[in-house]
């Protein structure tokens, strides 16, 4: 089936089979968002040191063998295996970076250090603990197998081999891997530009006194932290009151110069509808009621200006719901826009120590603490699962993921757990 445009979905939800904006599952929302994303295309060359977390725009191919010569895997002696039963004359030494110059004849060997070049005339290395040396004669007390303790040229990487594919996000190990090839720079996609702001008359910046009915704007700080960890270029546009003119100016300013715009608040039923009106005027935005908790309201679409079109993500205003929807939807979308492929979150199956009340038909992400007891991992849900209790995200170390088919659980049953470390 041809994917309908955002405008078609917004104006006629029936144009796509099984599409219901009032009952959207987590997996459906992820799939719909994915269909409308395109990665950035601009590239830049960076020194290795500056490429951590960036997405490769070109495949890296090995220009050489790694290692580029046969070398010893340990300190010992290099010799010809067929001579292993004989007393061997030690005729030289090979150090890492200082090869032995010459060839081994019958009854000869050389002392060799880890990483030292193995002479082409040798086919085996014996560790020094399995030898006996008297004056300049070596006796092997335990003969190793032919080819033992030799790391062959190209054993790690072969000349012409694909080392890292296009779309790969650079890790600390990758920096060393590329350096081992003698490659000083890599070509990456430009950094994704993401702007965000909060909406609501009740929001006050930190450091100011609260009036009755006001709260401090925490969402901008969690959004800043989550976006910074992703490695995007972040623009914090502040907390904007429910003023149509200010909201419009901020929205269009963000969309004109960024790849994505994220807002928190203003997308729930019953909230001030200024944002919804503006989004309808300046783009195509879908408003979904998610079958999930926390995070029922979610908006996704595009905002257009004369110079640019930006993807838009409208997150709920409750602090925990903001974080949950970011991790379950926005994070993967931004990684795709960066030019990479998000990896599925690994989930563990562990025993839940307490009973959980839950209605079937929606996915819940409860905050929990996973801990070890006598070698077995267990998880305990936090007592307060309210979407307004931000402290639960600091105290917890995992999500307890309860799918749509899961209903009430008894203590001792197995649940799926999604660890914060690695996704947060």
Image (cartoon, rainbow, N blue to C red):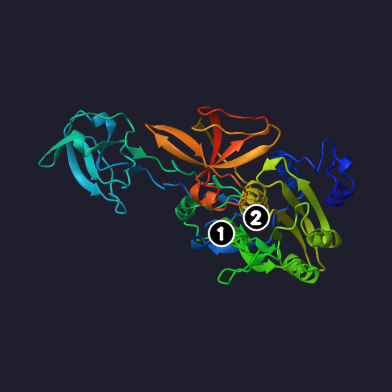
Task: Indicate left or right for 21 with 228 as reference.
Answer: right
* Vertical order, 82 against 13 (above or below): above
Query: Which residue position is annotated with label 2?
Result: 338
Q: Earlier in the sequence, mark 2 or mark 1?
A: 1
Residue 11 in the image: x percent, y percent? 89, 49
Q: Residue at x 58, y 33 (%)?
A: 356
Residue farthest toward the left in the current orientation of the protein: 135
Q: Residue at x 60, y 43 (%)?
A: 343
Mark 2 or 1, which is nearer the eye? 1
Residue 370 in the image: x percent, y percent? 47, 39
SS of the residue under disc 2: loop
The answer to which image quadrant residue 23 occupies is top right
Query: Which residue position is annotated with label 1?
Result: 225
Task: Indicate left or right for 363 with 151 as reference.
Answer: right
Q: Which residue is at the front of the view, 130 or 300? A: 300
* Vertical order, 196 against 58 (above or below): below
Q: Would you call the spot at circle 1 few (<14 residues within 10 Å), some (14-19), or many (20 or more)?
A: few
Task: Indicate left or right for 254 with 170 as reference.
Answer: right
Q: CA distance from mark 2 to mark 1?
A: 18 Å
Residue 61 in the image: x percent, y percent? 55, 49
SS of the residue under disc 1: helix
* Vertical order, 40 against 77 (above or below): below
Q: Which residue is at the front of the view, 263 or 346? A: 263
Residue 43 visible in the displayed image:
yes
- Quarter of the image with the N terminus is top right
């Amino acid at each position: 089936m041809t994917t309908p445009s955002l405008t078609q979905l917004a104006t006629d939800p029936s144009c796509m089979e099984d599409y219901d904006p009032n009952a959207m599952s987590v997996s459906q929302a992820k799939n719909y968002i994915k269909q409308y994303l395109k990665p950035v295309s601009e590239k830049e060359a960076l020194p290795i040191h500056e490429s951590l977390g960036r997405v490769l725009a070109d495949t890296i191919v090995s220009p050489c063998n790694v290692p580029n010569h046969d070398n010893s895997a340990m300190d010992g002696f290099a010799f010809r295996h067929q001579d292993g039963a004989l007393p061997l004359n030690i005729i030289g030494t090979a150090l890492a970076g200082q090869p032995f110059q010459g060839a081994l004849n019958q009854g000869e060997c050389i002392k060799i250090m880890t990483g030292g070049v193995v002479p082409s005339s040798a086919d085996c290395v014996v560790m020094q603990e399995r030898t006996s040396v008297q004056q300049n004669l070596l006796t092997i007390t335990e003969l190793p197998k032919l080819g033992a303790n030799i790391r062959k040229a190209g054993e790690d990487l072969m000349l012409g081999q694909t080392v890292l594919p296009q779309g790969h996000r650079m890790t600390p190990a990758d920096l060393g891997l590329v350096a081992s090839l003698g490659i000083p720079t890599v070509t990456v996609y430009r950094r994704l530009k993401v702007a965000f702001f909060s909406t609501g008359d009740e929001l006050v910046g930190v450091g100011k006194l609260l009036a009755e009915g006001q709260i401090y704007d925490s969402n901008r700080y969690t959004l800043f932290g989550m976006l910074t960890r992703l490695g995007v270029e972040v623009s914090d546009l502040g907390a904007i009151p429910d003023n149509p003119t200010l909201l419009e100016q901020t929205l269009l300013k963000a969309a004109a110069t960024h790849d994505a715009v994220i807002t928190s608040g203003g997308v729930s039923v019953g909230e001030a509808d200024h944002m919804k009106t503006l989004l309808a005027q300046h783009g195509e935005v879908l408003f979904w009621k998610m079958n999930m908790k926390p995070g029922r309201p979610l908006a996704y679409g595009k905002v257009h200006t004369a110079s640019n079109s930006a993807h838009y993500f409208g997150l709920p205003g409750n602090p925990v719901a903001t974080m949950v929807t970011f991790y379950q939807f926005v994070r993967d979308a931004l990684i795709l826009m960066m030019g990479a492929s998000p990896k599925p979150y690994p989930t563990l199956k562990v025993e839940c120590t307490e009973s959980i009340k839950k209605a079937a038909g929606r996915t819940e992400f409860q905050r929990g603490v996973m801990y070890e007891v006598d070698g077995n991992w267990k998880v305990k849900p936090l007592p307060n699962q309210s979407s307004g209790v931000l402290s639960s995200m600091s105290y917890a170390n995992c999500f307890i993921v309860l799918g749509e088919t899961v209903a009430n659980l008894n203590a001792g049953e197995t649940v799926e757990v999604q660890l914060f470390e690695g996704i947060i």
